[in-house]
Image (cartoon, grey):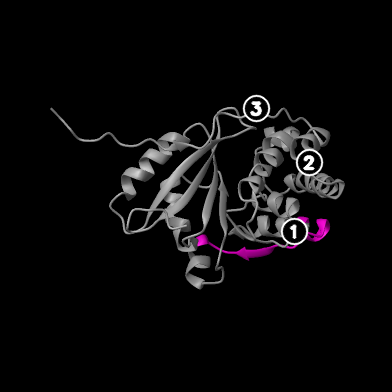
Amino acid sequence: MDNKAPATSPKLRSAAPKPLHIRDAADFVCAFSVSHETIERLELYAALLRQWQKAVNLVAPATLDEIWPRHFADCAQLPALAPNARKWLDLGTGAGFPGLVIAIIVANHECSVNLVESNSRKCAFLHEVARRTGVRVTLHEGRIEDVARGGRVKDIDVVTARALAPLDRLLGLSETFFSETTVGLFLKGREAAREIEEAQERRKFGRQNFSFSSVPSRVTGEGSIVEVRRVGLSGGISS
């Protein structure tokens, strides 16, 4: 008889919450209780996104009519999962998701948001949105690996990413930024559970391991937010 213990499944941090039905800015206010100033900034962001999309491929064209539910609301879930975070790092920011949305939501708090993006045209867009909305961000133009090696970003509370890479690859890109107290919040789709299992299997014998929990998305019916923390060599979570 095989007495080998079965592999543990990723922890589901809570039962599936009530889904959010967001169509526009008014629904967004009700869902996230943000200020009028925040909504004005997001509306300007949406207008700039539509304008720049004509020349720069920022998002899938089919999603331009779903900016509030598909992009803004998806990203806006993250600040509530790390309410005490002061220093954020968003990898592969692209059109600003989730990093620039987070920066707008936490703009009136004592927070700093770092954005890493290698595409110069997308960097130009991010700079323009930040300038026009009056939101302070630190933009690092370059590859994630180069930013990590350069040591320009330290003491991060939260690392974020959306639609950047499979989880195991994402951990390889981001592990340099993790301290004992850093949390990763990665927006994932329907394959989140499989990606977690693969990451666990590939990393269980590594020097730096991670623990995972999965938070059901309130915006995308099949999506999840994967929460990641570094695990110490002793086997406990170093937090």
Q: Amino acid at mark 3?
A: Lys
Image coordinates for residue 166, horizontal then vertical, percent: 45, 44
Image coordinates for residue 190, horizontal then vertical, percent: 50, 31
Q: Amino acid at mark 2?
A: Ser
Magenta extent:
129-144
Name which quarter of the figure residue 3 lies in. top left
Q: CA distance from mark 3 to mark 1?
A: 27 Å
Which residue is nearer to you in this view: 169 or 37?
37
Q: Amino acid at mark 1?
A: His
Image coordinates for residue 135, horizontal then vertical, percent: 77, 59
Kind of element beneath mark 1: loop
Upstream in sequence: badge 3 or badge 1: 3
| 151 displayed left or right of 50 | left
Q: Residue at x 75, y 52 (%)?
A: 104
The residue indicated by pointer 2 is: 33
Q: Are marks 3 and 2 in contact (CB under 8 Å)?
A: no
